[in-house]
Amino acid sequence: MHDAEFNSQVRLEIYRQFIEKQSCPSKTDVAHSLCALPEEITRAYAELADAHMLVLQPGNGEVLMANPLSAVPTPFVVETWHPEGMRKWYGNCIWDALGVISMLATDGRVLTSCGCCGEKMVVEVKSKRPFSRPEGIVHFALPARHWWDDIVFN
Amino acid sequence: MLLFRSEDHIDRWCNAWHLPRGATLSVDQASQLADRWYSDRLSPQFRRKTVEEAHAIFASLGLTGEFWKLG
């Protein structure tokens, strides 16, 4: 199989499991699901990370970010509503948190707090229309060309 | 990218981090940016956006100038 095709399968499997389980799959989970060897998954992860399609955890090489989803808890909790009930994920930032709702093509809300004072803030999105309580402003600290210099800070 | 209660709170945060002020978006702009950036992420055909495609998305929301230039 061509590497690009395999990498695409790996990427889609990560997202499929992430959405289904509401938590990020491990490399072992993905390897098992695709009947692939661990080293094939490790290589695909590295290539996807090089292409800025994943961000990996230092050391273990597991997924840290499958944007807009975060594999670890963040101050950007995303809740979406489905026929089977509410589902929950974490976004990497306010842009990504709103992006989770867009990616899933559903309504939902982001539970977060003011980056300065920590006051609770909620952004509800219904039919693609956001409503922030209290009213909010989004701040991008770094110019676009520097976003990937330190993606975790960004 | 963080959400703040007010412009004043953005200034306080920038002072605390010793960072110059960046760019601000309304929540509506940020939501539209998220939608244009991420709505295709689950497609098998998804690929990383080119610089030109990213600039076009930014420009469609009025996000132009040096701050929004990639590469």
Image (cartoon, helix red, strand yellow):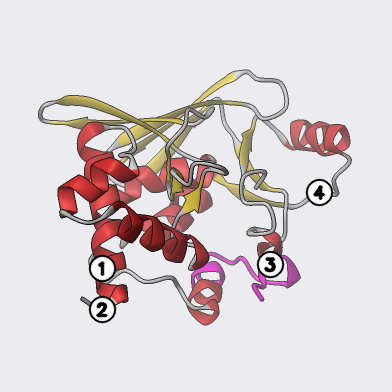
> Disc 3 or 1, which lies upstream in sequence?
1
Subunit bearing disc 1? A
- Where residue B41 appears, as percent x and y from the top left, is 33, 59
State which region is magenta.
B57-71
Residue located 35% across and 57% down the image: A39
Point out which mark residue A145 bears: 3
Disc 3 residue crowd, few under 14, some 14–19, many 20+, Cα 10 Å: few
Q: Amino acid at mark 4?
A: Arg
Furthest residue to the top? A119
For the residues labelled 2 and 1, say whether their Cβ atoms are less than 8 Å apart: yes
Looking at the picture, tell me which residue is in the foreground, B60 or B71: B71
Q: Alpha carbon of mark 3 to alpha carbon of mark 2: how far?
A: 31 Å
In this rendering, do the residues under marks 3 and 1 share a single chain? yes
For the residues labelled 3 and 2, say whether their Cβ atoms are less than 8 Å apart: no
- Disc 2 marks which residue? A2
Point out which mark residue A6 bears: 1
Disc 4 residue crowd, few under 14, some 14–19, many 20+, Cα 10 Å: some
Q: Tell me, yes or no, if residue A110 can be seen here.
A: yes
> Disc 3 or 2, which lies upstream in sequence?
2
- Disc 4 marks which residue? B21
Q: Alpha carbon of mark 1 to alpha carbon of mark 4: how far?
A: 42 Å
Q: Does dot 1 land on a helix, a strand or a loop?
A: helix
Subunit bearing disc 4? B
Q: Amino acid at mark 1?
A: Phe
Q: Is residue B60 above or below residue A149?
A: below
